[in-house]
Amino acid sequence: MKTTRYRFEQTVQSATDKTKEWLKDELRAILESDKDYTRKADYIGFSVLSIDKRIESIDEEIKELQELKKGLKTAKELVLIAGAEVFIEYGIDKLDGAGISSITFTGATTSDKTKLIIEDREALIEAGFYKKVLDEEMLRDLYHTSQYKDIIQSYTRLEVTSTPKPAKIKINKRRTAVHTEPTREKEVA
């Protein structure tokens, strides 16, 4: 385990365009020193290679933080869904707070996504619905309009996919700056 951070190592890790001349002076000083050429090479080489080790370390930390973030998002989603289930159990629509404005219940909903299914690409391209390829966005936009309705609907069909979304609770924050820090109330139970 490395416990020492050498001066030149710090210099190369914080190098910018503004410090380029200073960096050159540091390199000159190392090369002009009384040390053996192998020690000079190692000192410069290991200092520059330390950047790769720092980058690798930062990449690992970013990966860990992304995993932590993903876990926290999952935990929050589970808490909001569980809260909604308990609110339903107790018949609660809204719970007013002192530190926060309120916790409200939102019922389960579905999210619809419409997908345009092309059944005859060539006929639509010949009819003028293309950029260099078939313009599916234009077809989707014109599907329900009266203009070109017959030709579009004869060669396409709409497919609707519904995705259920579970009921959740929502934390509504106060809008005033009075309660900027969350305060822990005594547990009620």
Image (cartoon, helix red, strand yellow):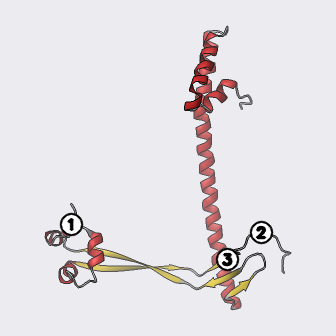
Gap in angstroms between the C-alphas marked 2 and 1:
55 Å
Circle 2 crowding by C-alpha within 10 Å: few under 14, some 14–19, many from 20? few
**For the residue labelled by badge 1, is the local secondary structure a helix, a strand or a loop?**
loop
**Tag 1 residue:** 130
What label does residue 172 carry, if any?
3
Q: In the image, what residue type sits under mark 1? A: Tyr
Identify which residue is drawn at 64% across, 15% down. 29
Q: Quadrant of the C terminus?
A: bottom right
| Count of labels in the image | 3
Residue 176 visible: yes
Question: Which x, y percent locates residue 134?
Answer: 22, 66
Relative horizontal placement of residue 1, taking residue 21 as reference (left or right): right
Return the x and y of residue 86 as percentages of the image width and height: 69, 84
Which residue appears at 61% of the width and 28% of the height? Answer: 12
**C-alpha separation, residue under disc 3 versus residue under disc 1:** 46 Å
Kindly indicate the quadrant of the structure image that contains residue 50. top right
- The mark found on residue 182 in the picture is 2
Label 3 close to label 1 by CB (< 8 Å): no
- Does the CB distance between marks 2 and 1 fall below 8 Å? no
Give the residue displayed 67% in from the left and 77% down from the top.
172
Q: Position of residue 36 (x, y in %)?
A: 64, 9
Could you classify mark 1 by the number of other residues whose Cα lies within 10 Å: few (under 14), some (14-19), or many (20 or more)? some
Examine the rendered structure and indicate whether residue 77 appears above or below residue 110: above
Query: What amino acid is at disc 3?
Result: Asn
Residue most extreme to the bottom: 91
Can you see residue 45?
no
Q: Give the mark nearer the N terminus: 3 vs 2.
A: 3
**Mark earlier in primary sequence (3, 1):** 1
